[in-house]
Amino acid sequence: MDEVIPRAADVMIQADGLTVGYGEHLVLKDVTFSVHRGEIVTVLGGSGCGKSTLLKALIGLIRPLAGSVRIRGANITGAERTEALERMRRHIGVLFQYGALLGSLSIADNVAMPLEEFTDLPPSLIADIVRFKLEMVGLTDYAHFMPAELSGGMRKRAALARAMALDPEILFCDEPSAGLDPITAAELDELLLEWNRALGITMVVITHELASIEAISTRCLMLDGSAKGIIAVGRPDELKKDSADPRVRAFFHRQPRLLRAGVSSASAEG
């Protein structure tokens, strides 16, 4: 099958020359990439490589030191950042690493929050939408439970229901499988794939879980802490099989000796 070349109009997220840091500590430097409509792009790499920092920059939680981020064509890092962010909020959903559910509210009330904040819908319609979203994640019978009363996997699904409350065009997920057993993680992967295929939702998923990466990725962006940016882009099968970079090969083959060999070779050449 011939490769489909995405059109410029299909770009949902565009990062150009993105540099992000905390004080004098640079985490990412001059990062450029795009995410196209309908893709599931996984952002991967070792601990501390900047995955979650990149996500925070993409959703406007931190302001980059340089470069720009455009969401659906709107520059959320420019002079009109505040207005652009407000417009963007209606079109994106975010699943935070630990769910970030409010412990003082029921699951139903957590899911209702975005609807109450961003719409003028009557309470009866909001209640109907909440029931539908909880049904989507298999939590219909748990609407009145508190977050502390649910398992880790159920809390993740409840947080997903909240992230989907406004029917977003783009869904950001930060380590959705973290802390979950393999079966629960696989069920979450299947849910993301189902929404992507049925609803056409564009997704950016931060993860280091190989099983999830191979199951859901349209493309991968691999970050490296020492490089302070992207060191590989491609389908997971391509990166696993064809990459000559020892950092990429070590990650996908779970063989740290490949990384050590690459470092030794580079030192010898130097």
Image (spheres, rainbow, N blue to C red):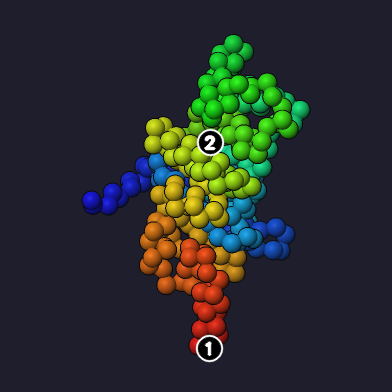
State the residue position of label 2: 92
- Amino acid on which disc 2 is placed: Ile
- Lateral position of residue 101 relative to residue 17, left or right: right
Placement of 23 over or under 173, stated as above or below: below
Q: Report x, y in % for residue 173.
A: 56, 43
Number of other residues with Cα within 10 Å of mark 1, as a class: few under 14, some 14 to 19, many 20 or more:
few
Residue occupying image coordinates x 38% and y 61%:
238
Number of other residues with Cα within 10 Å of mark 2, as a class: few under 14, some 14 to 19, many 20 or more:
many
Q: CA distance from mark 1 to mark 2?
A: 48 Å
Residue occupying image coordinates x 43% and y 60%:
233
Residue occupying image coordinates x 54% and y 75%:
257
Q: Report x, y in % for residue 171.
A: 51, 39
State the residue position of label 1: 268
Q: Is residue 217 visible?
A: yes
Q: Report x, y in % for residue 174.
A: 59, 46
Placement of 246 over or under 195, stated as above or below: below
User: In the picture, residue 256 is in which quadrant?
Assistant: bottom right
User: In the picture, residue 20 is in which quadrant?
Assistant: bottom right
Placement of 53 over or under 254, stated as above or below: above
Residue occupying image coordinates x 59% and y 62%:
46
Q: Report x, y in % for residue 29.
A: 57, 63
- Amino acid on which disc 1 is placed: Ala
| Label 2: element kind | strand
Which tag, 1 or 2, sits closer to the chain's start?
2
Q: Is residue 87 visible?
A: no
